[in-house]
Image (cartoon, rainbow, N blue to C red):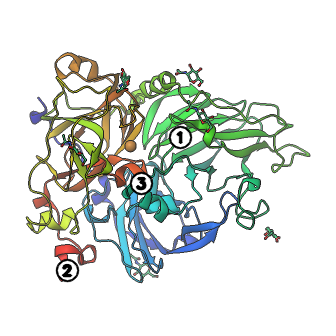
Amino acid sequence: MAGTMLPPPRPLLAAAGALSFCLCSSLLLAVADARVHNYTWDISYQYKSPDCFEKLAVTVNGEAPGPTIRATQGDTIVVNVHNKLETENTAIHWHGIRQIDTPWADGVAGVTQCPILPGETFAYKFVVDRPGTYLYHAHYGMQRVAGLNGMIVVKVPDGIVEPFSYDEEHTVLLGDWWHKSVYEQATGLTETPFVFVTAPQSLLINGRGTFDCSLAPSGTCNASSPDCGLRPLFTAVPGKTYLLRIGSLTSLSSLSFEIEGHSMTVVEADGYYVRPFVVKNLFIYSGETYSVLVKADQDPRRNYWAASHVVGRNASQTPSGKAIVSYAFKGNNPWIPPPTAPPAGPAWNNTVIRVQQSRAIFAHPRFVEPMPAGADRTLLLLNTQNRIDGHIKWTINGVSLIFPATPYLVAMKRGMTTAYDQRPPSDTYDHMSYDISAPAPTNGTVRSPVYRLALGSVVDVVLQNSNMLNNKSETHPWHLHGHDFWVLGYGEGKFNPAADAWRLLNVRDPIMKNTVPLHNDGWTAVRFRADNPGVWLFHCHIEAHVFMGMGVVFEEGIERVGKLPPSIMGCGQSKGLH
Ligand SMILES: *[C@@H]1O[C@H](CO)[C@@H](O)[C@H](O)[C@H]1NC(C)=O
Ligand SMILES: *[C@@H]1O[C@H](CO)[C@@H](O)[C@H](O)[C@H]1NC(C)=O
Ligand SMILES: *[C@@H]1O[C@H](CO)[C@@H](O)[C@H](O)[C@H]1NC(C)=O
Ligand SMILES: *[C@@H]1O[C@H](CO)[C@@H](O)[C@H](O)[C@H]1NC(C)=O
Ligand SMILES: *[C@@H]1O[C@H](CO)[C@@H](O)[C@H](O)[C@H]1NC(C)=O
Ligand SMILES: *[C@@H]1O[C@H](CO)[C@@H](O)[C@H](O)[C@H]1NC(C)=O
Ligand SMILES: [Cu+2]
């Protein structure tokens, strides 16, 4: 049983030698030891036109998306965040970084810290303990919608060989974009009558898109703006192989990404090597990252489309995201649109092919992370949409999560029992009689509770989808902070604990991830070890959905958390604490 398993190995980092400091803009020496990368970021609103429509965007040092953080496994990242938003708080989450021994640096306002006030500076300091492709983004209210996001690339140390090879690498950050402000969106979700955010106006590739300015009021959109438009993704040398590190930080959309005429070999998912598989379209959900190999093996005399398409929701309401892949060939101009029509993308309503791709992802045979044979606790989490006091909310086993004024981490560490809801949420729901193919019949409650997990225990979570109030079901990408989980499996319909337990167990080579889709009309099962002292959010990565309560909070080993930095305090009941 799981209880007798040894704890997983701790990262080697603590054993690393003396840290050598560097200024990252002027890194010249290759240092064998772990390094500290020290960034200073001004977070401010700026007028930007990422899809040619001008609007305010939250920027990092004036840029949206923010800079890619590049480091080597074992390095320390320091980001000094100056909040220059003037009238708005912020907090930044380092997505996929487990924050071992630094749970206060996870960057979730209300869970791991107080929000950073305008005019204040907050220093995030954490170790990137695994190689792979990760992300960062705002985690305050729905602020991510306004643009604060970027990528983190963690390389393997020199001398470590990866299970694939390539000539060059590029990052591809996918997003979706609205012309309504984040305030209008959030207000629509909370007011009565409810107004949903609706379909995004554009899909962005590396922060750039092309909106048809003839559809915008005059003076708001400029197709010649230097911020926007079709641009080269990369230029390939014929015969060479490229590693694309692809991440999605869409606020709503599930995507399909493809490069016209080229297949992609998937080699990494959320920082884990996968058993390589070849796709034409890569389905990617918000919060996921994949690395793919692309071989420059097509006619080099022309350019090709890179394109993203909405899937899982009506795709005809959002034009596809587009960029250009060109070849280094005499006379080729990498800015010229390809001679062909952009790819149409797969049928947006074809759930079957999306589930098939989810099921095709296994650990690389030489990098299987041994999984405990059983779980100490199983959580059956029913996702429903409910009407609560006239508002539309998402609830998990009847609870719609609202972040308390005092961050959970501070409240729990300091024993502030009135700062959050002491009544534990339910481990299960009435799965015998609940009808998942009907809108939720009961009302839920808006609360701030926490699942307390035994430190070191093994937890299985089965996420169960159900029909929304409009009697349809849709995909929710669930993201776990502070851990990676083994993906046990995906199923259709309602998970039946008695009959389906055997279907769960891919014990041979399950992939580990930090984000996983809960497909429409189905369930998804994951397993993780609660071995990282802290308080961790687990939530739908659709910005509107977590804003409407679609998340839960896990705590484990709070007594083992080190001394909290005073900089995370100052709000709610943590005023005046240090
Ligand atoms: C990072 O740089 C800032 C500003 O240059 C400096 O004040 C701070 O001490 C540095 N921190 C580390 C850990 O190097
Ligand atoms: C559109 O942007 C271009 C490039 O910055 C600029 O030259 C032009 O004046 C702008 N047009 C309008 C109508 O603002
Ligand atoms: C999808 O959206 C388009 C454009 O708004 C609309 O014409 C079509 O009916 C929609 N399809 C479905 C299945 O809702
Ligand atoms: C998807 O929608 C199209 C047109 O709206 C319809 O013909 C097709 O049957 C649908 N496919 C699935 C798998 O539902
Ligand atoms: C649910 O809430 C609605 C509106 O607030 C109310 O009319 C209805 O009676 C409630 N239903 C139950 C089962 O509590
Ligand atoms: C809701 O949709 C399901 C199919 O998912 C259907 O069987 C059922 O009749 C619908 N219920 C209502 C109230 O429309
Ligand atoms: Cu969701």
The N terminus sits in image quarter: top left
The amino acid pointed to by label 2 is Lys
Q: Give the Cα separation between the discs numbered 1 and 3.
A: 17 Å
Badge 3 element: loop
> Residue under circle 1?
291
Q: Does any atom of ligand 7 lie closer than 8 Å to the CB of label 1?
A: no
Q: Give the Cα separation between the discs numbered 1 and 2.
A: 44 Å
Badge 1 element: strand
The amino acid pointed to by label 3 is Gln
> What's the residue at 34%, 23% (across, down)?
491
Which of the pair 489/539 is nearer the observer?
539
> What's the residue at 32%, 22% (across, down)?
493
Vertical comparison of 58 with 392: above or below:
below
Lateral position of residue 149 relative to residue 190, left or right: right
Vertical comparison of 508 with 25: above or below:
above
The amino acid pointed to by label 1 is Ser
Q: Earlier in the sequence, mark 1 or mark 2?
A: 1
Q: Which marked residue is nearer to the observer: mark 1 or mark 2?
A: 2
Which numbered disc covers residue 53? none
- Location of residue 357 in the rendering, given as x and y in whole percent from the top left corner: 48, 26
Q: Give the Cα separation between the discs numbered 3 and 2.
A: 37 Å
> Residue under circle 2?
575
> What's the residue at 63%, 37% (across, down)?
316
* Residue count near mark 3 (Cα–Cα under 10 Å), binned few <14, some 14–19, many ≥20: many
> Residue under circle 3?
73
Q: Does any atom of ligand 1 lie closer than 8 Å to the CB of label 3?
A: no
